Image: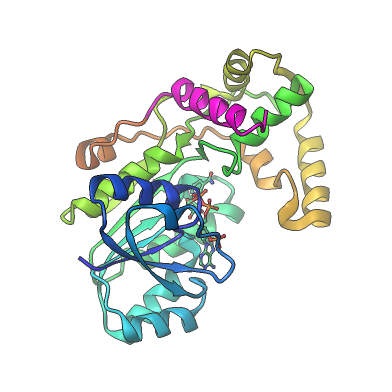
Amino acid sequence: MKTLLTGASGLTGTLLLSRLAVVSPGSEISCLVRPTSDRSFIEKLNLAINYFIGDSSTAESWDRILSQYVPDTIVHIASIRHIPVILDSLEKARQTPRLIVVGTTGVYSKYNHYSGIYKDVESRLVQYPGSYCLLRPTMIYGSNRDKNLHKLIEFCHRYGFFPVFGVGNCLLQPIHADDVAQAILAALQNPEVQGSYDLSGGSVVTFRELLALVEKLIGKPARPISLPLNLGVWLATILENSLGKRSPVRQEQILRLQEDKAYAHDAAQRDLGFFPRTLEVGLQQEVELLRSQGVI
Ligand SMILES: NC(=O)c1ccc[n+]([C@@H]2O[C@H](COP(=O)([O-])OP(=O)(O)OC[C@H]3O[C@@H](n4cnc5c(N)ncnc54)[C@H](OP(=O)(O)O)[C@@H]3O)[C@@H](O)[C@H]2O)c1
């Protein structure tokens, strides 16, 4: 089977390839990577990786790749926002490979400013004439490469507290990146699986319960300091406007702390054998990893 993967050098992508190297050593896989992508980790894996250098957000890259390669399956992890470009290029190339796409449960946000783009992209995907499997993870964590919990762990470890903007009792269900990787691999190994699946973690917690868990696992205080929501939104806006992508926090993250983000994963459990680890187990693994790397 000819598989083309995007996002191979990212957190979820490296875990997916690590798993593939174990279940199917020596397998051939093509990866679309940027010229700047760090390939050092995946190059050590027992896989025969063929690289296409490009940018998965551009038609130029897809048109070029699809003119020389006909994949049976495209596993697109890089960003669901690239899907319209990919679908257009596939149509031009008259190809209909199976698509396995990593989306986001952000599509359910009541803040249309954030969810609108995902809704639009998903509505394009459902019109795809080939088979597709859309996997929507919740907040992904698992290492110093995640964009969420490792920052919280580091902050608590250093300062002994964490700001809680608003009430802090909305629900979260973070998912370990390796559980996302397992679900992608299951989708890849089961070509009959199609449709959309929410991928949430094994535990539902409030933000305050999350801090209590971090406190227990790092063995240091992680006191919640209550602050008004508006202050958080104001601070995040200033940071984003001045630092752009380097901002430690985004306005969206603060606003979305005010909405419940717990989603059932029964469909993924049934069709993909998806049994995610509990948050306590996953965070324990992340804390141990951060300790071994000297991050905390
Ligand atoms: N983080 C979350 O909490 C969260 C929640 C829900 C859904 N998701 C989605 O889940 C997916 C995986 O997340 P992750 O945290 O594992 O991602 P990640 O670590 O940030 O990795 C992203 C990967 O995509 C590649 N990539 C990004 N833009 C690209 C482009 N224009 N052309 C080619 N490659 C590109 C990156 O390449 P480089 O190495 O060159 O940067 C990297 O390999 C993403 O689609 C993300 O949007 C994330």
Is 81 colored magenta in this rendering? no
Left or right: 133, with 291 as reference point: left
Is 286 colored magenta in this rendering? yes
Query: Which sits in the foreground, 173 or 56?
Result: 56
> Which segment did they paint magenta?
277-296
Left or right: 185, with 116 as reference point: left
Residue 121 in the image: x percent, y percent?
Answer: 44, 64
Specify the quadrant that holds the C terminus: top right
Query: Which sits in the foreground, 263 or 174?
Result: 174
Q: Is residue 52 above or below residue 286?
A: below
Residue 10 in the image: x percent, y percent?
Answer: 50, 53
Specify the quadrant that holds the N terminus: bottom left
Instruction: Look at 50% across and 64% down and name the residue there.
Output: 81
Residue 192 in the image: x percent, y percent?
Answer: 15, 55
Splitting the image into 4 quarters, where does residue 125 fall? Answer: bottom left
Q: Is residue 217 above or below residue 50?
A: above
Instruction: Look at 70% across and 18% down and name the residue there.
Output: 222
Residue 164 seen: no
Most prominent secondary structure in the magenta stretch? helix
Q: Is residue 132 above or below residue 207?
A: below
Splitting the image into 4 quarters, where does residue 274 fall? Answer: top left
